[in-house]
Image (tube, grey):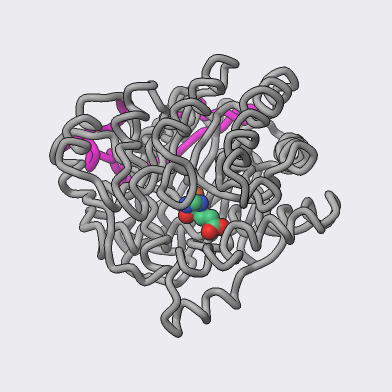
Amino acid sequence: MSNSLLISGASQIVTVRGRGPRRGAALSKIAVLHDGAILVRNGLISAVGPSAKVEKLADSKKAEKVEVGGRVVLPGFVDAHTHLIHAASRAEEYELRIRGASYEEIARQGGGILNSVKKLRAATAEELKGRARGFLEQFAEHGTTTIEAKSGYGLDVTSELRVLSLHKELDAEQPLEIVSTFLGAHVVPLEYRGTSEGKRQYLELLEKRMIPEIAQNGLAEFCDVFCERSAFSLSESRSVLKAGKARGLSPRIHAEQLSNTGATLMGIELGAASCDHLEYLKPADVRALAKSKTVATLLPGCDFHLGLRRYAPARELIDAGAIVGLATDFNPGTSPTLSMPMILSLACTQLRMTPAEAIAAATINAAYSLGREKRIGSIETGKQADMAVFEVADYREIPYYFGVNHCWMTMKRGEMVYLRD
Ligand code: NIG
Ligand code: FE
């Protein structure tokens, strides 16, 4: 078989080429090719441009032809915030919330994240892995080719290390790329609650035992913290992120999701790769993000699922010049979706981002937040051949047809990992 592939016949190739990350007006410049083709060699994009030119090159390389029949080609989505590994859904809490209980009330009664912790600890590694594999197939079916994955439902040494090891194993055993993040500071586990010393002891365990062991074994690239009144305070969060950073784990942070804690300013001060959620941003936070290299990763799936009707100020962020990203936040509590096309729909209708802005936020800017913008996030010569083809004629139809998955084919490093029957 030839190691070259020619992708031709697209109605549009959304290349998102050019310098990343994208800020302000540049976010919507996604560089669409109308009569274009892509040549893939050994898993990399070796040419992209006008069909006639690329096809001639393909002939000389005896490339195998992949005809996409008037569909739209996008860079594969980069989902830079997921809680991939969890043991079960929390559909019972979904119903309780519909009946009027709040997310924080449910958490105070031992539900929420602690509910998922109890279930994860009771599950075997094989069960967790099998379930995650199923999800990874679904990510691929929705056009996602790289995901970030957080621990945070283990919250003891054995369970956290087990989940992070599973990230590593899954990354090696299936085609999608998994970027591992340690989120031991998700909430204080039950066994450390109820005594005044408990939280301090848990933080000590995190910083003195878990982080060093994780760093030593290369089990995570990033360290995340849930900075919120019901989880960790600003100074506790800072301390954990600094401990991670000292061991080479770059900071990311769950910030201003349910209240404003100052997490965004603190994250920027520590050079965080990303501040995520941001529903309760203040104008000073927006200004600080605009001046920083920290990505503002917005997660509208959470607000939609929780029915909170308060979305992050995406327009203000974009207009101020912040680097805006988008992700699913796939998790059983606040955002049980792994569909980036659905996130694009929410970004367009609820965050008032244009389809072009949403696509750039979900590809090149998300790749930048994972430190991978030179390798993934756009269709450009020399980058990995990570692409998603959609059964539409115009890229705007991807968010427009909300709740329907139009992904027709997904390619990772030049390998077809999903093709609709
Ligand atoms: O990103 N906010 C904290 N963590 C998750 C929710 C986790 C859960 O409810 O299980 C989030 O929303
Ligand atoms: Fe999250």
**Where's the N terminus, which quadrant?**
top right
Is residue 368 positioned above or below 248 on the image? below
- Residue 166's image quarter? top right
Residue lying farthest to the bottom in this orientation: 99
Instruction: State left or right for residue 265 relative to residue 10.
Output: left
The spot of residue 377 in percent (x, y) is 44, 35
**Where's the C terminus, which quadrant?**
bottom right
- Residue drawn at (62%, 46%) of the image: 195
- Residue drawn at (72%, 59%) of the image: 118
- Residue drawn at (56%, 63%) of the image: 112
Instruction: State left or right for residue 385 relative to residue 380.
Output: right
The range drawn in magenta is 18-47
The spot of residue 333 in percent (x, y) is 54, 63
Instruction: State left or right for residue 369 relative to residue 397.
Output: right
Is residue 222 positioned above or below 332 on the image? above
- Residue 341's image quarter? bottom left
Instruction: State left or right for residue 10 relative to residue 247.
Output: left
The spot of residue 110 in percent (x, y) is 60, 64
- Residue 206's image quarter? top right
Residue 204 counted in the magenta span: no
Whether residue 182 is visible:
yes
Is residue 289 positioned above or below 186 on the image? above
Residue 21 counted in the magenta span: yes
Whether residue 173 is visible:
no
